Amino acid sequence: MALSNNVIGAINFIAVLLSIPIIGAGIWLTNGAADSCVKFLQWPLIILGVLILIVALAGFIGAFWRIQCLLIFYLIAMLVLIILLVCLVVFVYMVTIRGHGIIEPNRAYLEYHMDDFSGFLRRRVRSSFKWDGIRSCLSQTNMCAELNQSFRMAQDFFNAHLTPMQSGCCKPPTQCGYTFVNPTYWISPINMAEDMDCLQWNNDQNQLCYACDSCKAGLLANLRKEWKRANVILIITVIVLIVIYIIGCCAFRNAKTEDLFRKYKQGYT
């Protein structure tokens, strides 16, 4: 039984270590360009990571001191957490499967449209109440001011690989036909397009295209990219957790078998 408990203790120590990348992914998202203004996935990740840490520690202590109730708690609780983690992985995959940018002629950067994203992501920014807070957060960043420092000539700007939020929020949509002066100052065309985003553009450095749907789409594109990166970490972690959980179940069963066999032998001595 001692050997089986040692195995359970060892795999629970690994589970403790696996909680670190989950918590780290949640903390990393709090500093992400989009997630810092749209707080949604960070806390579920951090909470799940902390719960896995607590449950793994309970299993480690139960194996080390041979406390059977803690081991049973570990097996049940870890199974529930793994199921929740798998559900989160599937959910993130489903809501980020759509949202690729659109290529415009003679432009290196992409354009983004709200209809290209999943309904769940669109609802994060659709209402004016939600967007007002996000817009205020975005306007306090220096993502647009950086463009003025980096690009002076129109062709250099058109050849730049902008982030989705810079493409959507810091300039008017390409289809509007504005004339470049600098990255955040554009001359309006004589015949304004019917697209509302073309009318929303404002050369005021505090407004720009923060009220545009293209800005919302750019933020969702950034959000999608960050969530997909976090999901890679979750997929790897959940696979390893499932493997060590199966090993833990086998070790626990062997420990119970060894214990029954030991009691059986004692009954005949």
Image: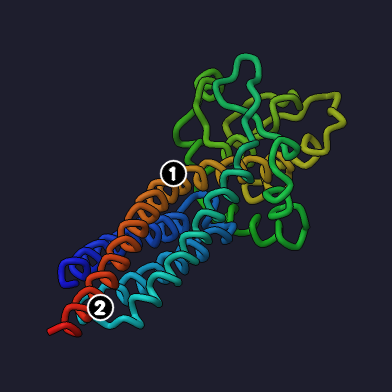
Q: x, y percentage for residue 61?
A: 25, 78
Nearer to us in this view, 148 or 56: 56
Is residue 117 visible to us here?
A: yes
Tag 2's secondary structure? helix
Image position of 79 with respect to 203: above or below: below
Compared across the picture, whether 6 is left or right of 84 comes to left
Q: Amino acid at mark 1?
A: Val
Q: Which quadrant does the C terminus fall into? A: bottom left
Q: x, y percentage for residue 129?
A: 75, 63
- Sequence-first disc among 2 and 1: 2
Image position of 149 with respect to 140: above or below: above
Residue where numbered disc 2 is placed: 61
Nearer to us in this view, 254 or 138: 254
The answer to which image quadrant residue 256 occupies is bottom left
Is residue 203 visible to us here?
A: no
Tag 1's secondary structure? helix
> Furthest-top residue in view?
106
Nearer to us in this view, 205 or 9: 9
Q: Residue at x 45, y 43 (%)?
A: 229
Compared across the picture, whether 223 is left or right of 7 comes to right
Task: Tally the numbered discs.
Answer: 2
Q: x, y percentage for residue 104?
A: 65, 20
Residue where numbered disc 1 is placed: 232
Instruction: For marks 2 and 1, give the one nearer the viewer.
Output: 2
